[in-house]
Amino acid sequence: MKVKLKIWRQKNAVSKGKFVTYDFDGASPEMSFLEMLDALNTTLIQKGDNPVAFDSDCREGICGACGMYINGYPNGPVKGITTCHLSMRYFKDGQTIVVEPWRAKAFPVVKDLIVDRMAFDKIQTAGGFISTNVGSAPDAHAIPVNKSKADDAFDSSICIGCGTCVAACKNASAMLFVSAKVSQYALFPQGKIEAKERVKAMIQTMDELGFGNCTNTGACEAQCPKNISIINIARLNREYFSAKIN
Amino acid sequence: MSSFLGSSVSKKFVMAIFGLFLIVFLLVHLGLNLFLLSDNPEPFNKAAHFMASNPIVKVFEIVLMGGFLIHMLWGIILQIQNWIARPVQYKQMAQTQISFFSKYMIYTGGIIIIFLLIHFTNFYFVKLGLVEGDHENFYGMAHELFTIPAYLIFYLFSFLILSFHLNHAFQSAFQTLGLNHNSYTPTIKFIGLLYSILVPAGFAIIAILLYFSN
């Protein structure tokens, strides 16, 4: 399988990057997209060139480290998956594939396709926690939890913080990520204690880090590899107004 | 209070509240415009006089103008922040399937501002005495304007653009206010779709009828 790869190459955070074209015939439909990049890197190393730098860790769709922008889609043209789950069988023989890093002021490029996503950690640190006594695990039935709320909280908690929402949004907004993190705590009794401070702190940090504003286009929801719903954003808005008024 | 108004979520909240206020006003305006179809100028002129002189309406007018200015100003500020948030654009155009009109709100909004400036010059500024005109006969002024083909075309184009703007704005305002649930959001979206088609179409049909009646 032969593909024409147009990949963003950037030496470091301060240098000016550019697209470099590679005619690569070492791909096969059975490969994952990352395996194809691995194979490309092997040929580049053999030629004495610098390999293409990209993030990856679990390669099981769990960590979300591997995100990149492929042919106009974050994580490629298949819905509900991370880049590591993207297979080369979704591309045609001879197809041109444009590969770019996430583009956002809050996610500066470190090298090639690697971006610094520490901004998400800063938002999480600002309020994404609950206070609880340490020690042995409490009785699971000690605090009753509504089943439907527990289900909603679980659906929110599966956000892996990959940054796809920011990459997909035309405004580079992080509202889907923040809303998922706020929701997963707000829906539980244990999360109510710091609910007001949490939502205010996380929104403030998000704004300070230079993410864009949500304009409800729904691109984040459409591309999220974990199918996080924008219903979370509405909940975030409610939590915020409630925290500010009370 | 300043921190409430300062955050991105709060700015969106203010935009949504005033946006919904403008949406309601648009319906009132359409109701008044129906009087233009009458052969008798009195009902429309009386309604216009009532709108210009009633103290309660005057309070609403201040809120309306303030709301329009804030909606416009906040929209521009948020858009500039959004452009800054992505200083380097993608080479490949985004392929994600999203609402078509949601991508162009700042541009459709800009065209609506231009239309409103012309509309204000023709009517509202006349009422305020800033522009010369017969402020006791808005009926005649409206009928006269719609005899001009270029004005009619611009008017129809503006309401087409308004329809695009409302298509996203209606349901977006509810989402911003925190109202999104599987049980009622489909209804909100349906009403928004109907509103965005029927109300601008109402204005357009009245304009076309006036053109052909003159």
Image (cartoon, helix red, strand yellow):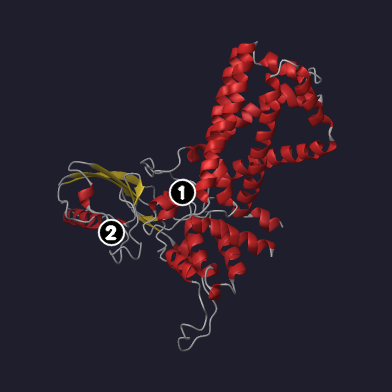
Q: Is residue B94 above or below residue A246?
A: above
Chain on which label 2 sits: A
What is the count of numbered marks? 2
Q: Quadrant of the C terminus of chain A?
A: bottom right
Cα separation between marks 1 and 2: 23 Å
Q: Is residue B121 above or below residue A1?
A: above
Of all residues, the one furthest to the bottom in this rendering is A136
Question: How far across and how far down the image is residue B179, in percent?
Answer: 57, 53
Q: Nearer the viewer, mark 1 or mark 2?
A: 1
Q: Say which element carries label 2.
A: helix
Q: Say which element carries label 1.
A: loop
The amino acid marked with disc number 2 is Cys
Crowding at label 2, few (<14), some or many (≥20) Cα neighbours within 10 Å?
Answer: many
Mark 1 highlights which residue? A218
Looking at the rendered structure, which numbered label has been put on residue A84? 2
Question: How far across and how far down the image is residue A51, in percent?
Answer: 25, 56
